[in-house]
Image (cartoon, rainbow, N blue to C red):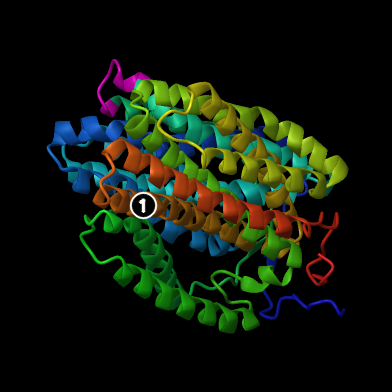
Amino acid sequence: MAATDLSPRTGAVPVPAPSAPVRTGPVIALLVVAAFVVILNETTMGVALTPIMEDLGVTASTGQWLTTGFLLTMAIVIPLTGFILSRFTIRQVFFAAMSLFALGTLIAALAPSFEFLLAGRVVQASGTGVMMPLLFTTVLNIVPASHRGRMMGVITIVIAVAPAVGPTVSGLILSTLTWHAIFWIVLPIALLAIALGAVWVRNVTETNRNARFDVLSVLLSAVGFGGLIYGLSSIGESASGHASVPVWIPLVIGGVSLTAFVLRQLQLQKTDGALLDLRTFRSKTFSLAVVLVSVVFAALFGSLILLPIYLQQVLGLGTLTVGLMLLPGGILMGVMAPIVGNLFDRFGPTPLVIPGLVIAASALWGMATFDEGTPIAWIVVVYLGLNLGLGLTFTPLMTSALGSLPRRLYPHGSAIVGTVQQVAGAAGTALFVTLLSVTSAAALSNGSDAVLAQAQGVHVAFFVGACIASGAVVLALFVRKPADVVEDEDLSATH
């Protein structure tokens, strides 16, 4: 099949990377640590929400905006990173992102009221949304294809471990200090990263000075992805009858805006003017990997929200016990990540992704058997199995997806993967919580007690998740390792 022409048509003048040798190790290490800190911060609010509500005198429906507002901002910012990383240098983007994050952290730490705290979280999210696409794009540009698996394995540590330890770190801080301390402890780390960035971060990628900023695309993206995330996040509340806005309204508005956004990008990319270049999907490897990444993130975030509910409301366990039970899973994924990365470099994705999804699906089938009498030891074993399976799939899928793209589409591919993670996480959470809520409500109406009703809801939610994961195993058979080098003018169907 003939190669697809992806050559620039706008006469953009790339700015070459400096000829002086760049020490890639410190740059990547700094970006990894910075990304770990910003994602760790993202997951600390769950445990801190109750003391914040008590201290600032707000209700749960108001307090949840500290999380919802953060996610909405991320959903708006991440799709913009394709343009940002094409137009500006890595050094410029790093300082802008970390400065925004540090400023937001300072506002939150000093916040005398809920409104100030929410503003701080929004500013934080503006920087956080840029960090993972920045890290992906940097690695793709400066790490040889033969070693990308190993390096992407290190990135997986950030994705897997930071969310797992966030609640634990938050709990430890809150056991002796006020919620303000969460932000005061993070702030000097962010400032140190900025200082080290002045020494280590260099411009190692090309930029397109003629990249255009399409205001209409930005507006459509913000309404589309923002509406979708908000709608998906509200499904659980709607199923419980507590949603302030009918859930179909943001979903419809988001869906219509997103459709218009896609049509706009298809038109603009004919002249290389797209905010988010969708020609990335001409790579079969990228498209397939993105679908599987969606399933993996939906399963991960869905189980992370459902399992604590089951452990607390069905088994009656305390928050500390629940946190300690979930922590080993994230640590396991972190330990596995470099090993999986090395195996990817040697053998490609197929020997990892297929068994990984089989193990993950099997673990979800095991979770579908959970009831009010399930032993804690068995729950821990099954949850570790889920993390083992997901750990085998994260690095190979992301490396295959992004490595199948030509160099100039790296920023757009990174932005798409980041956006998919956010949407899939929200969708997985919405699916699991909705199934739990609807099934539990039906069981209660049929005379079941509250504990048994929750147990039935958990069973149905994990059953559906297991079915979806089992279907993904079939798609995994078609995942292939991308070629070591993909030229800008050549994105053949073999990828």
Q: Is residue 435 left or right of residue 326?
A: left
The vertical placement of 43 against 374, above or below, is below
Q: Residue at x 25, y 23 (%)?
A: 178
Which image quarter: residue 418?
bottom right
Q: Measured from the top left, where is residue 147 in percent x and y?
A: 81, 41
- Which structural element holds mark 1? helix
Q: Which residues are magenta?
A: 172-180
The vertical placement of 491 against 150, above or below, is below
Which image quarter: residue 401?
bottom right
* Quadrant in the picture for the C terminus: bottom right
Q: Measured from the top left, where is residue 153 in percent x and y?
A: 69, 38
In front of the other: 152 or 30: 152
In front of the other: 483 or 122: 483
Q: Residue at x 20, y 60 (%)?
A: 244
The residue where tag 1 is placed is: 439
Q: Measured from the top left, where is residue 428 in percent x and y?
A: 47, 53
Residue 446 is inside the magenta segment:
no
- Can residue 198 be seen by looking at this rendering? no
Q: Is residue 94 left or right of residue 53?
A: right
The kind of residue on which mark 1 rests is: Thr
- Can residue 77 be seen by looking at this rendering? yes
Residue 176 is inside the magenta segment:
yes
